[in-house]
Amino acid sequence: MFCKYCGKQIDDEGGSFCPYCGKHLLENCPPAGSPAQPPPYPAPRYNLQDLPNGGWTVLGFFFPLVGFILYLVWQTTFPIRSKLCGKGALIGVIAEVVLVVLYIIVIFVIIAAASASYRYGQP
């Protein structure tokens, strides 16, 4: 082994100092018997305020206008919440349109059934 400071050859007797220059040979090594510490890893970052929650979808379903407004407002700050509100609003609007069409069909069927049994001009 050679000393990294003076360049002279040193006997490998387990000494931690160079006999020629006196420098410490094992400066960056941890003391014997102590384990090396693992590198610190950063804790995973979770945005606890933006976790998926079905309540926002239900809110958007029953109140599509509110769901659409929240979708637009939360797009940058809460993207997961925003998507849930938008999906709920879209599903709510589609469901409302389907229900209105069915309601109109039922009304026409009732009117047609009532007018078929009515006799015009006969006592």
Image (spheres, grey):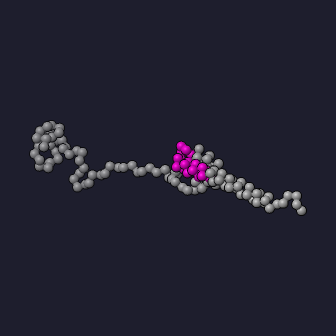
Please name whichever residue, 55 or 8, is drawn nearer the observer in this view of the structure: 55
Residue 86 falls inside the magenta stretch = yes
**Where 53 falls versus 3 (above or below)?**
below
Residue with the most extreme front position: 122
Q: Is residue 105 something that shows in the picture?
A: yes
Q: Relative to 1, is 58 on the left or the right?
A: right
Which residue is at a point 35% across and 49% down the rendered structure image? 40
Quadrant in which the C terminus appears: bottom right
Q: Is residue 96 something that shows in the picture?
A: no
Residue 39 falls inside the magenta stretch = no
**Where 86 falls versus 122 (above or below)?**
above
Which residue is at a point 88% across and 58% down the rendered structure image? 121
**Where 7 falls versus 29 (above or below)?**
above
Please name whichever residue, 63 or 106, is drawn nearer the observer in this view of the structure: 106
Image position, residue 4 (x, y; %): 17, 39
Give the number of marks.
Answer: 0
Image position, residue 94 (x, y; %): 62, 51
Q: Picture quarter containing residue 61?
A: bottom right
Image position, residue 14 (x, y; %): 14, 49
Q: Relative to 78, is 19 on the left or the right?
A: left
Image position, residue 90 (x, y; %): 60, 49
Q: Main secondary structure of the magenta part?
A: helix
Residue range (magenta): 74-92
Quadrant in which the N terminus appears: top left
Which residue is at a point 60% across and 52% down the rendered structure image? 91
Residue with the most extreme right position: 123
Please name whichever residue, 7 or 69, is drawn nearer the observer in this view of the structure: 69
Which residue is at a point 56% across and 48% down the rendered structure image? 82
Q: Relative to 81, is 113 on the left or the right?
A: right
